[in-house]
Amino acid sequence: MLQTDLYSFSYKKGSLVPSCKKCKTQHYYKKGKNAKGIQKYQCRNCGFHFVWTSDLPRYNVFSEIISFAVEMYVETGISLRTLAKKLKKIFNIDVTYEAIRLWVKMSKRQIFRRKEQKETAWHADETYIKIKGVGHWLWVVRCRDTGNVLSWRITQGRFFKDAKGLMQDALNVAGTRPETITTDGLYQYAAAIKKVMGWQHYTYKKKHIIDSGIGKNWFIERLNREIKRRVKWFSTFQSLEGANSFFSLWFHHWNLRPST
């Protein structure tokens, strides 16, 4: 698995000890250079010839550089083409923007169930994004106490099944029902909360707070503004898979922030 938590990143070319890509041993000797001037090696154990350009099989780039590129793309507003030029300038490697896009898709993360299970206040909302020019909805549930995103999903419509899946995912991550849930007036939230939480009518009326973004639900509207700011640079995603990969990484890094 690629490591993308490189807040303290350093890289020195050749700092990783070469190992045979066939038998994984580190017993080798140098065997001249190829046409590009890259050092070749031959394994003493199995006799396999290889060049040490990556610690990953079938790759020409080290995992540290891939992790660095993925984090740069997710954490900043840099475009894929600009990032490819930066990698050439910093690490002197030739990589296309399409390769970086595939790295991002490959590195998507999952939100795991939190260890401490206690009742907290939740805020839920949906915001409008575009995928290949077609409008979609990004649903998000955020915990008021920790500031972390508990669940999210991307859908084309705003239906009961979408709201129900969102609440069920948040409940799975939190491990317990919330103290309160604040949403806007979208009626699908009411039906989904009743179905997933199983509250009686009196309890539901007490714990489900309905308010607009400029009122009690301001907490998640701040996150929505940050999402809009981040996706503004590329205006539209090119595929649903790409959007899911991006937000899985983006929310993963958001939850790692010391203060949200």
Image (cartoon, helix red, strand yellow):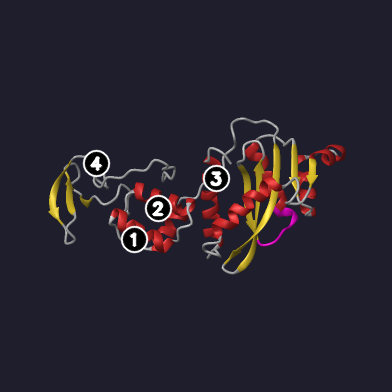
Tell me, yes or no, whether the two marked residues, 1 and 2, touch with CB atoms within 8 Å: yes
In the displayed structure image, the side of residue 139 where residue 99 appears, left or right: left
Residue that label 3 marks: 254
Mark 2 crowdedness (10 Å alpha carbons): few <14, some 14-19, many ≥20: many
- Helix, strand or loop at label 1? It is loop
Residue that label 2 marks: 69
* Pointer 4 or 1: first along the chain: 4
In reply to whether residue 70 is colored magenta, the answer given is no
* Pointer 2 or 4: first along the chain: 4
Residue that label 1 marks: 95
In the displayed structure image, the side of residue 19 where residue 81 appears, left or right: right
- Helix, strand or loop at label 3? It is helix
How far apart marks 2 and 3 lie (CA) works out to 17 Å
Observer-side mark, 4 or 1, equals: 1
* Pointer 1 or 3: first along the chain: 1
Residue that label 4 marks: 17
In the displayed structure image, the side of residue 177 where residue 7 appears, left or right: left
